[in-house]
């Protein structure tokens, strides 16, 4: 875990007093240590980007798809959640959504999938359950998770065999 960083002043959007997500992503990419595969930025500040026909639209999070960085803000979830349970569930899903973008996944049409497009509302988060099977398969394909696991098992087996 990196030490807490000050918000980069160049990302501040003065007319609305909030922070531009794409500029935060550029900043995060710059400070990502070379030995880190990914970086997840977390802030309590309100963040925004140009979307849905608005110059400055408040958002929950943003990522460079496949770009190894994402930013997640607690701000909107905090003010729009009715209780701690709802807040925690939404937060978990948001972080997974943005992280999966950073890993290379795009949006998914499955209503229960974490990678569903929020379309500018927070409510879609409540219908989502998990990563659907096709999104999981894509991640497997990108990162050869199964392949790594098989290889690791083979290594362990080989090692154990030495002692027999
Ligand atoms: Zn998304
Ligand atoms: Zn999916």
Image: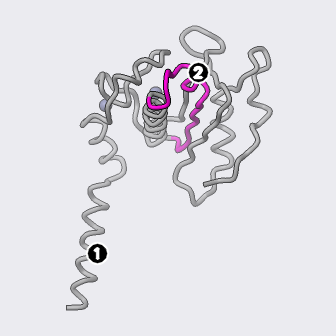
The residue lying furthest to the top in this view is 53
At a point 49% along the width and 31% down the height, the residue shown is 84
Residue that label 2 marks: 79
Farthest residue in the front direction?
83
Image spot of residue 130 (x, y percent):
32, 35
Can you tell which mark lies on residue 155?
Answer: 1
Q: Quadrant of ligand 2?
A: top left
| In this picture, residue 110 sits left or right of residue 68 | left
Q: Is residue 163 left or right of residue 42?
A: left
For residue 76: magenta?
A: yes
Marks counted in the figure total 2
Query: Residue at position x 44%, y 27% from top?
Result: 86
Q: Position of residue 108 (x, y in %)?
A: 34, 26
| Mark earlier in primary sequence (2, 1) | 2
> Where is residue 11 shown, x and y percent of the image?
74, 30
SS at mark 1? helix
Which image quarter holds the N terminus?
bottom right
Which label sits in the foreground, 2 or 1?
2
Residue drawn 28% across and 76% down?
A: 156
Image quarter (top left, top right, bottom left or bottom right) of the C terminus: bottom left
Q: Position of residue 137 (x, y in %)?
A: 27, 42
Identify the secondary structure beneath mark 2. Answer: helix
Instruction: Give the quadrant of residue 8.
Output: top right
Q: Residue at x 80, y 33 (%)?
A: 9
The range drawn in magenta is: 67-85
Image vertical order of residue 40 relative to residue 157, above or below: above
Mark 2–mark 1 distance (CA, rounded to whole Å):
49 Å
Of residue 126 and residue 150, the one placed in the foreground of this image is 126
């Amino acid at each position: 875990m990196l030490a807490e960083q000050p918000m980069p002043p160049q990302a501040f959007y003065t007319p609305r007093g909030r922070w531009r997500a794409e500029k935060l992503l550029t900043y995060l990419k710059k400070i990502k240590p070379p030995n880190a595969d990914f970086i997840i930025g977390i802030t309590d500040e309100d963040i925004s980007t140009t979307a849905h026909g608005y110059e400055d639209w408040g958002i929950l999070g943003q990522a460079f798809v496949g770009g190894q960085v994402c930013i997640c803000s607690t701000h909107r979830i905090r003010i729009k959640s009715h209780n701690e349970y709802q807040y925690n569930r939404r937060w978990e899903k948001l972080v997974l959504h943005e992280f999966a973008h950073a890993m290379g996944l795009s949006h998914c049409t499955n209503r229960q999938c974490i990678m569903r497009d929020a379309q500018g509302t927070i409510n879609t988060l409540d219908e989502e359950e998990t990563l659907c099977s096709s999104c999981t398969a894509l991640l497997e394909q990108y990162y050869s998770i199964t392949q790594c696991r098989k290889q690791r098992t083979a290594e362990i087996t080989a090692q154990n065999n030495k002692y027999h």
